[in-house]
Image (cartoon, helix red, strand yellow):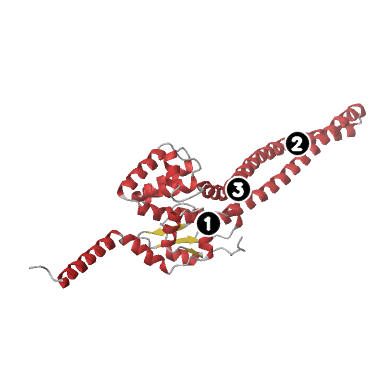
Amino acid sequence: MPRKFGDWLKVGLFMIVIGLIAWGFSERQAIADYIKLADYNPPASISQLAADDTVTAEGRHYFYLNHPELNDKATFRQNCPNGTEQTVVLGCYHSGESGIFLLTVNDPRLSGVEQVTAAHEMLHAAYERLSSSERSQVDGWLMAYYKTVKDPQLLATFANYRKTEPGQVVNEMHSIFGTEVANLPPNLENYYKRYFTDRAKVVGYYTNYQDAFTKLQQQIAYYKAQLEQLKSSIASDEAAASQQNTSLNIERNQLNQEAASGDTSDYNAGVNNYNAAVERYNSLVAQIKSEIANYNQLVQQYNQSAVAINTLGNELNANVETVPSARR
């Protein structure tokens, strides 16, 4: 018996429902993303970070899905408990796209920290979105490059991750290589173009604020070497001055004896030698005073550099409250 129109309509509606369900299942991630971003308007500071990092549409998508925040230290400690990151770049990504949190850094000498942090955490979100086949390929590229790394700081960083987060080492390589290493193999350079239009700009931010630490460390090393050299020179000169002073006392006593005995010939000859020795002694004493003054000045400069590098370290330590300075 031929089907009635109503029967065909039911079949058609059923097929449409099945099709919508199938489409919804296949596009469930896109639908979830759409819902999550529908009412999200990034603050100006966050959109500026994305612009500074030259983030692509794909990278911006992963960044904004996490509703990133710039936090003061107290708020950051709540959002990023100790241990979520091991590097100087202070930020954290909560898996499942549950949030990206960035530490606000005000010191102008550390300009670029926030940009590198944002890029670093965005790459964690991007890595989590890779398919199994993509991740396998990217992991292979990362590990191949890692085997060529000679930088002691990078090697120490990954050694620390192996102790604290052994399951996240390659994930961290993905973020660190992408934001801190200037020259990568072509396969990785091409891969990171998915997320940055100018990755060199991100690495430039990293280099700039690292230079602030490097310069202070070099200054401290220089002052320390100069202080050690001056300390040794002062000790040597003081020992020589002590010997000269002893000799002068002996000569002076001898001259007094000659004067008392009326031996004017030996006395007059000895006076000239004595006066020359006194001049040498006074010159050495003046040199010691100059060395001590230089030493004290170097101590002051050394202490200033030590305080400066400690201040920078504290600025990047979420557990140490610092006096806020004007935003750059």
Query: Label 3 vs label 2: CA separation?
Result: 44 Å
The amino acid marked with disc number 2 is: Thr
Question: What numbered label is drawn on residue 51?
Answer: 1
Residue pointed to by mark 2 = 246
> Are discs 3 and 2 less than 8 Å apart at CB?
no
Would you place residue 25 above or below residue 269 in this image?
below
- Badge 1 element: helix
Find residue 249 and name its label.
none
Q: Quadrant of the C terminus?
A: bottom right
Residue 320 visible in image: no
Give the amino acid at mark 1.
Ala
| Foreground label between 3 and 2 | 3
Q: Circle 3 — which element? A: helix
Of the image marks 1 and 2, the number of the one nearer the N terminus: 1
Task: Residue 127: give x, y in percent of width and height.
Answer: 38, 52
Q: In terms of depth relative to the viewer, which is nearer, 88 or 226?
A: 88
Q: Quadrant of residue 67?
A: bottom left
In percent of the image, x 32 and y 45: which residue is there?
136
Residue closest to the eye, 134 or 107 = 134
Q: Residues within 10 Å of mark 3 (few under 14, many from 20)?
A: some
Q: Crowding at label 1, few (<14), some or many (≥20) Cα neighbours within 10 Å?
A: few
Q: Which residue is mark 3?
A: 216
Mark positioned earlier in the residue sequence (1 or 3): 1
Q: Are marks 1 and 3 in contact (CB under 8 Å)?
A: no
Q: Amino acid at mark 3?
A: Leu
